[in-house]
Amino acid sequence: MALTEYTLSSQQVLQGGFLKVYRDTVRLPDGKEAPREYIDHPGAVAVLALTDAGELVLVRQYRYPARQTFLEIPAGKTDPGESGLATAQRELLEETGYTARHWHTLPVAWPCIGYSNEKIAYFVAEGLQAGASQLDEGEFVELVHLPLAEVMALARRGELPDSKTLAGLFWLDAWQSGSLSRDPAQ
C-alpha cells in the first residue's frame, strides 16, 4: 500500500529565531487533500559523555515550554554548515566545559515526527578532559555526574522523562553491548 503524501502547496506561517512553522496542503494516498502543519528544525545533536569512572555527564536545566527543570544529556541545535560531530564537540564544551579525545557516532532519532522534521544525531564522548563551560547568553545549567547504572535506574523508574535522553540511553546501551558499531566518529 502506498502511504506517501505529496505536497500540493506550502506556506510559511511563522519565522522564529531558528524555527519555522509551515502550513501545507497534501494529497493523501486515496487522492483526497488534507492540511499539515509542522515545525522546520535545523537538526540537533545529543552527547553521551562518559567519564573514566563510568559516570554519565548530565545537565539539569529549566525548559520553558514544559515549565519545569529536567535532567538530560548535553545537546543543542546544529548551526548552518556545521557537521554533527562539530556540533557535538561545541555543545559538550559549551554546556559542560569538557572536551573528549574519543568520539563515536550512534544512530539518529526523530523525536517529534507528528509535528516536526527535527532529527537528533547521537554521539558518545570518551576520554574527557575538564575545562570551563562556555554557556550561551541566557543559558543556565547545573552540571551533574551520575554513575551510568544510576541513570539507567532513573530512566526505568520514569524519572528521566526527556525523550532525547531516553533515546540516547537506549543507543548507548546497544553500543556498549556491541549491537552497534564502535567505529570512531568522522
Image (spheres, rainbow, N blue to C red):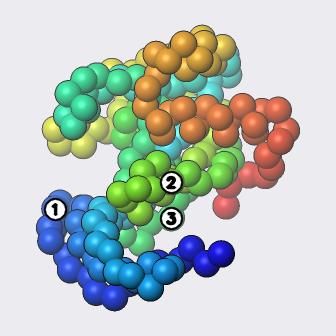
Q: Which residue is mark 3?
A: 83
- Give whichever of 122, 111 is nearer the camera: 111
Q: Which amino acid type is shown beneath numbered disc 2?
A: Trp
Q: Which amino acid type is shown beneath numbered disc 1?
A: Gly
Image quarter of residue 102 = top right
| Tag 1–tag 3 contact (CB < 8 Å) | no
Residue at point 50% right, 54% down? 110
Q: Which amino acid type is shown beneath numbered disc 3?
A: Ser
Residue at point 44% right, 85% down? 31
Q: Is residue 89 above or below residue 67?
A: below
Is 145 on the left or on the right of 177, as rendered? left
Residue 110, numbered label: 2
In the rendering, at what x and y percent does residue 170 appear? 65, 34
Q: Is residue 97 above or below residue 119?
A: above
In the rendering, at what x and y percent does residue 166 appear? 54, 32
Q: Inspect this view and state whether residue 28 appears.
A: yes
Crowding at dot 1, Cα within 10 Å, few <14 / some 14-19 / many 20+, comes out as: few
Q: Secondary structure at mark 3?
A: loop
In the rendering, at what x and y percent does residue 18 appear? 24, 61
Q: Secondary structure at mark 2?
A: loop
Residue at point 73% right, 52% down? 184
**Which numbered disc flags the more N-terminal residue, 1 or 3?**
1
**Which numbered disc flags the more N-terminal residue, 3 or 2?**
3
Is 77 on the left or on the right of 146, as rendered? left
Residue 16, numbered label: 1
**Which numbered disc flags the more N-terminal residue, 1 or 2?**
1
In the rendering, at what x and y percent does residue 165 appear? 50, 33
Mark 1 or 2: in front is 2
Q: Quadrant of the C terminus?
A: bottom right
